[in-house]
Amino acid sequence: MTKLAFLDQELQALREQGQFIDIRTIESAMGAWIQVDGKRVLNLCANNYLGFANHPLLKAAAANAISEYGVGPAAVRSIAGTQKLHLELEEKLAQFKRVEAAISFQSGFVTNQAVIPTLSGAGDILFSDELNHASIIDGSRLSKAKTVRYKHNDPADLALQIQNEKEVRRRFIITDGVFSMDGDVAPLQEIFEIAEKYEAITIVDDAHGEGVLGEAGRGVADHFGLHGKIDIEIGTMSKAFGVVGGYASGAKKIIDYLRQRARPFLFSSAVTPADVAACIAALDILLASGELVEKLWANTKYFKEKMRELGFDLGQSTTPIVPVMIGDTAKAHALSKQLFEHGLFAMAITFPTVPRGKERLRVMMSATHAVEDLNFAISAFEKAGRELEVIA
């Protein structure tokens, strides 16, 4: 069809620029080793930090929920879609995050689209870290508030930007807790102090911090001793928790207002009983023990030390997100392909996801990895790195 001819040009341009994504197919349950495009490979791609995606207790909880509640609520939360399980999940999330209340949504991405435009509007200013996740950017675009970006993880620039904006009804400071491409952590203590000084409402998206940072994975606010002090903590249930869904937590009055006005809560069907029950099971495990979080960090420390010894540049990461910096699109893709041939699944991350010159492989640590798995990965990186002259 001629009216869609522009798409042929766009797709061809993506291929010529090396930006066309060849999406691989997973043919097994998520774990340390998985089946990808017919090949058994060590998995260093998934956000399955704690191994919950195929955990027996979560699977049992999901199966039991289907037996008792069926496969779906068939309604939005505000009409007939709020089941007992949803309330139990929200109560346990609030307990886990050590705040007054929580509300759950269909995904972490949707949660930002629910929270930001519901709480902010015309006359408000959103002060947003320049490397914030796309869901924060899109949530901000849905708001009628003005967005002002500040330099990445730079409290001084944040304060300067706030000082420069004189005409404002309400101020919001929005940041990722852990930045997904670089694995660095927001300077939350300094951000909190600035927010207190200028009476700004703080929103932290902790998608990669929950289950990873803080006591038994309670997240970045707990990591800095700020639980209950950050106004709104946003999270996802699809990474460390291994399932699907999102949530916002904080003061009860904030959560009550979101139940009344957040559009995804009012106009999109509720998350399925199986998913909710599995999320509850994950929370129960973490409320009882931080053992899996400790294993995750032990694996992270070991892998990073060995990779740096080989000469790989791991950027500024201080978390289980390990960016293997390459700095070239073709080499990044070539390294990913070579590693796959050696039995290792690690995808290249290139422009526009990261800036040109910052191309990398993003490697994700998991508590499911044994030391033998990590040694296998390190050996594969060394062999492929030398073949492609990425390391000496």
Image (spheres, rainbow, N blue to C red):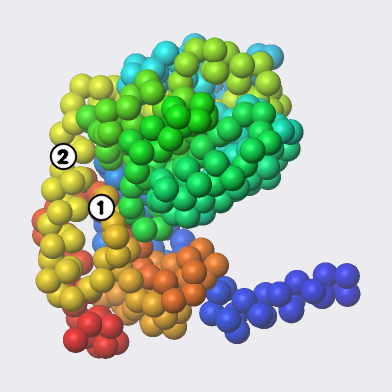
- Answer above or below: position of 23 versus 193: below
Q: Position of residue 213 (x, y in %)?
A: 27, 38
Q: Position of residue 279 (x, y in %)?
A: 39, 28
Residue 123 lies in what quarter of the image? top right
Q: Position of residue 253 (x, y in %)?
A: 54, 12
Under mark 2, the amino acid is: Glu
Whole-number angstrom distance, CA of label 2 to CA of label 1? 15 Å
The structure residue drawn at horizontal position 51% and vertical position 37%, both measured from the top left corner, is 173
The structure residue drawn at horizontal position 27% and vertical position 28%, both measured from the top left corner, is 225
Please rate how many residues cluster around mark 1, counting C-alpha atoms within 10 Å: few if below 14, some from 14 to 19, many from 20.
Answer: some
Which of the two residues, 333 or 309, is positioned nearer the viewer here? 309
Q: Does label 2 or label 1 sit earlier along the sequence?
A: 2
Tell me the residue that label 1 is attached to.
318
Which of the two residues, 137 or 190, is positioned nearer the viewer here? 190
Q: Secondary structure at mark 1?
A: loop
- Answer above or below: position of 113 versus 350: above
Instruction: Say which quadrant the N terminus sits in.
Output: bottom right
Q: Position of residue 312 (x, y in %)?
A: 22, 73
In the rendering, which numbered label is found on residue 269? none
- Answer above or below: position of 256 versus 56: above
Instruction: Say which quadrant the C terminus sits in.
Output: bottom left
